[in-house]
């Protein structure tokens, strides 16, 4: 059963206290009732500290343990404000904007929160792409000297897969769901693994004539080779991705964190027709309690290669 606030007024009324946020996490994490993560027993009691104690093995569990909220020192109300803000921004939110909106004392707290929430945007066991799927690659980042094309050095390579729904859609929409991933190279091994992971067998894969795609027809897919200029849907997704990265994050995206941004773009694009911002918030919270905790080593993530933050400001 989906239960979420429909607008900002409902959101503020419903999640005005810490207890209301905890109750919502309990509802989403254990929709069929609490289940001990150790022994599986559903018999429990609530301690005075708000923990769930299993009556069989006496293991105590917090509703935030093992989620992206694990060990957080900030109120859940602030986390909920962050998720509502992010999901209600049409083009996404950067760390500086989130810091200002929530009045966070540290830019880097906002930065870490955004990365945790981006990680939670990918639903575990999500359905693969199907039907006719275009696959292509692109380089992300500013202009750099050196060799061009698939053999380019010191550039960030991203592979894109997008469903072509132009032949089966009754509404006239041409583009279905997308999948994006940062890859080390455009070799056959890498591209084949991406396709196996994200596209159902039996689907029709449309690519250009790059040698890395030559084995697709032997993997249980129908393979159609077209000219590079004919991959119009994949090229449109690539153009939208680059425009989004440049417009929202000023292009200051570090390659080691690129997959998090790709997950956010995928989340937003695949839900672009949703008429309910509240449902996007619901999905964000739902997936946040299912995602594993994210831990950062001190100073490991702090600076980008360009010396600028994701908002484009010098550090």
Image (spheres, rainbow, N blue to C red):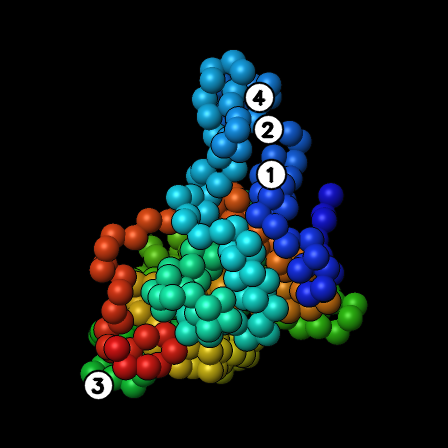
Residue at 72%, 59% in the rendered image: 10
Q: Residues within 10 Å of mark 1 (few under 14, many from 20)?
A: some
Residue at 53%, 33% in the rendered image: 50
Q: Position of residue 3 (x, y in %)?
A: 72, 49
Residue 44 circle label: 4
Q: Nearer the viewer, residue 298 or 194?
A: 298
Q: Quadrant of residue 144?
A: bottom left
2 and 1 marks in contact (CB < 8 Å): yes
Q: Nearer the viewer, residue 75 or 44?
A: 75
Q: Residues within 10 Å of mark 2 (few under 14, many from 20)?
A: many
The Cα–Cα distance between marks 1 and 4, rounded to whole angstroms, is: 13 Å
Q: Circle 3 sits on which residue?
A: 145
| Earlier sequence position, callout 3 versus callout 1 | 1
Q: Position of residue 5 (x, y in %)?
A: 71, 57
Residue 26 circle label: 1
The reply to whether residue 180 is in sight is no
The Cα–Cα distance between marks 2 and 1, rounded to whole angstroms, is: 8 Å
4 and 2 marks in contact (CB < 8 Å): yes
| Earlier sequence position, callout 4 versus callout 2 | 2
């Amino acid at each position: 059963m989906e239960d979420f606030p429909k607008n900002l007024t409902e959101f503020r009324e419903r999640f005005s206290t810490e207890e209301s946020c905890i109750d919502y996490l309990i509802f989403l994490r254990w929709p069929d009732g609490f289940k001990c993560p150790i022994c599986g027993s559903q018999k429990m009691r609530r301690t005075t500290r708000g923990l769930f104690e299993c009556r069989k093995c006496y293991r105590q569990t917090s509703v935030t343990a093992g989620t992206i909220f694990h060990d957080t020192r900030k109120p859940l109300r602030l986390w909920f404000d962050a998720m509502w803000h992010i999901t209600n921004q049409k083009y996404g939110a950067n760390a500086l904007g989130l810091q200002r909106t929530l009045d966070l004392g540290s830019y880097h707290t906002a930065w870490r929160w955004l990365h945790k929430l981006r990680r939670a945007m990918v639903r575990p066991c999500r359905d693969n792409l199907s039907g006719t799927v275009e696959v292509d690659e692109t380089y992300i980042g500013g202009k750099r000297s050196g060799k061009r094309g698939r053999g380019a050095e010191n550039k960030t390579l991203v592979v894109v897969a997008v469903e072509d729904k132009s032949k089966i859609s009754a509404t006239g929409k041409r583009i279905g769901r997308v999948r994006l991933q940062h890859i080390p190279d455009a070799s056959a091994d890498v591209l084949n693994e991406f396709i196996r992971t994200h596209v159902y067998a039996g689907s029709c894969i449309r690519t250009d004539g790059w040698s890395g795609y030559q084995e697709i027809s032997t993997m249980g897919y129908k393979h159609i080779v077209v000219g590079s200029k004919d991959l119009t849907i994949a090229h449109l997704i690539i153009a939208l991705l680059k425009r989004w990265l440049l417009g929202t994050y000023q292009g200051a995206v570090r390659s080691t964190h690129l997959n998090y941004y790709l997950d956010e773009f995928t989340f937003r694009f695949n839900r672009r027709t949703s008429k309910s911002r509240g449902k996007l918030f619901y999905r964000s919270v739902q997936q946040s309690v299912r995602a594993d905790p994210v831990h950062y080593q001190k100073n490991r993530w702090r600076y980008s290669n360009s010396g600028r933050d994701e908002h484009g400001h010098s550090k």
